Image: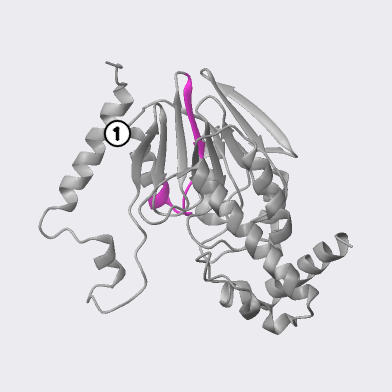
């Protein structure tokens, strides 16, 4: 019988304790909290954080922003993404991590500038941790001013590719191009066959942050490069339908949806569909994505999307 790690037992015990607490009388579910105190509405409450063992030594913390990956090595910890900005979110993240390891955090990698992923990088910078991000992320932070507050900049940047090693674990960090933003990082753990993508891959309908360098057309190139990595488990920026990670087959299905969406959008522009009718003209019900909404229809993003498609069509002539 394979010997189970101390980390596995710690994570399992932590999960059992959380489950037991949630079943006690008077403990509200996340759905109840989302309805507000009177149960009749109100803003949804942030989902509580929860740590889950994915592979030996590899964990994912869900809730309170984007997914955070945690790799435990014999020389310290590597973390990918740092949750929503705020002391409580940071403290909760570290509390979850401390259920599986007391070792110091040596590296933090940020997948893109949005505060639900980059929010607490300043805490790690202050602690002397190497916080790594793409140069495009640092540039985006210069003009990024979310209501929650501006995240601190990273203290280590790279242009295209960077490799780190810690305690026998190798991590490859790639900027494969502009997709969700102009500063996306794809984080690959070859020894674990795990890739963490930030919001380049999500469990729900994605969006393109054109004001900060995103591109629907170039997104396809990024997905193609991810597909060539040797992985069997993918940690998306946000999970969906109760499933924390994706298999490679599920990623390839996501990639196919993107290819279908962009091809149909390019066809509509080629046929002369006007900008104001573009989103409604693109069939997406069969791929389960809704793009005929305010997020995609924001005028600045719509203008950029249309120009993106026009450029792609021109390149094919």
Residue visible at 48% across and 52% down?
A: 66
Q: Which residue is found at the position 38% from the left and 49% from the top?
A: 243
Q: Is residue 77 magenta?
A: yes
Query: Could you tell whether 20 is left or right of 214 in the image?
Result: left
Rendered residue at 51%/62% (across/down): 148
**Furthest residue to the right?**
317
In the rendered image, the quadrant that contains the C terminus is bottom right
Residue at label 1?
Answer: 11
Give the image location of residue 24, x and y in percent: 12, 53
- Reply above or below: 279 against 118: below
Q: Residue at x 59, y 22 (%)?
A: 165
14 left or right of 156? left
Q: Is residue 91 above or below residue 7?
A: below
Q: Residue 146: x percent and y percent?
A: 57, 64
What residue range appears in magenta?
75-90
Percent across and percent down for residue 62 are: 39, 48
Q: Is residue 315 shown left or right of residue 37?
A: right
Could you say whether the residue bearing mark 1 is in a helix, strand or loop?
A: helix
Quadrant placement of the N terminus: top left
| 213 shown above or below 301 | above
Residue placed most toward the observer, 116 or 1? 1
The answer, for residue 80, to whether it is visible in the render is: yes
């Amino acid at each position: 019988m394979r010997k189970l790690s101390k980390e596995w037992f710690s994570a399992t015990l932590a999960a059992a304790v959380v489950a037991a607490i949630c079943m006690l009388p008077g403990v509200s579910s996340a759905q109840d909290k989302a309805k507000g105190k009177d149960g009749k509405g109100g803003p949804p409450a942030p989902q509580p954080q929860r740590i889950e063992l994915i592979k030996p030594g590899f964990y994912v913390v869900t809730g309170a922003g984007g997914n955070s990956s945690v790799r435990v090595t014999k020389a310290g910890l590597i973390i990918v993404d740092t949750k929503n900005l705020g002391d409580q979110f940071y403290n909760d993240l570290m509390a979850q991590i401390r259920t599986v390891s007391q070792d110091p955090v040596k590296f933090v990698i940020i997948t893109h500038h949005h505060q639900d992923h980059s929010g607490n990088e300043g805490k790690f910078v202050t602690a002397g941790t190497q916080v790594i991000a793409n140069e495009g992320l640092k540039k985006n932070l210069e003009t990024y001013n979310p209501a929650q507050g501006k995240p601190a900049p990273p203290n280590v940047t790279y242009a295209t590719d960077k490799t780190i090693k810690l305690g026998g674990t190798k991590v490859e960090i790639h900027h494969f191009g502009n997709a969700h933003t102009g500063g996306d990082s794809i984080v690959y753990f070859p020894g674990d066959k795990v890739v963490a993508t930030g919001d380049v891959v999500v469990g729900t309908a994605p969006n393109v942050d054109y004001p900060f360098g995103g591109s629907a057309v170039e997104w396809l190139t990024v997905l193609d490069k991810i597909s060539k990595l040797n992985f069997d488990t993918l940690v998306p920026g946000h999970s969906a339908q109760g499933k924390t990670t994706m298999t490679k087959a599920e990623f390839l299905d996501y990639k196919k949806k993107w290819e279908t969406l962009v091809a149909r959008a390019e066809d509509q522009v080629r046929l002369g569909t006007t900008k104001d009718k573009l989103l409604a003209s693109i069939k997406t019900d069969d791929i389960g994505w809704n793009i005929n909404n305010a997020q995609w229809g924001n005028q600045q993003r719509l203008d950029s999307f249309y120009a993106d498609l026009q450029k792609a069509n021109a390149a094919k002539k």
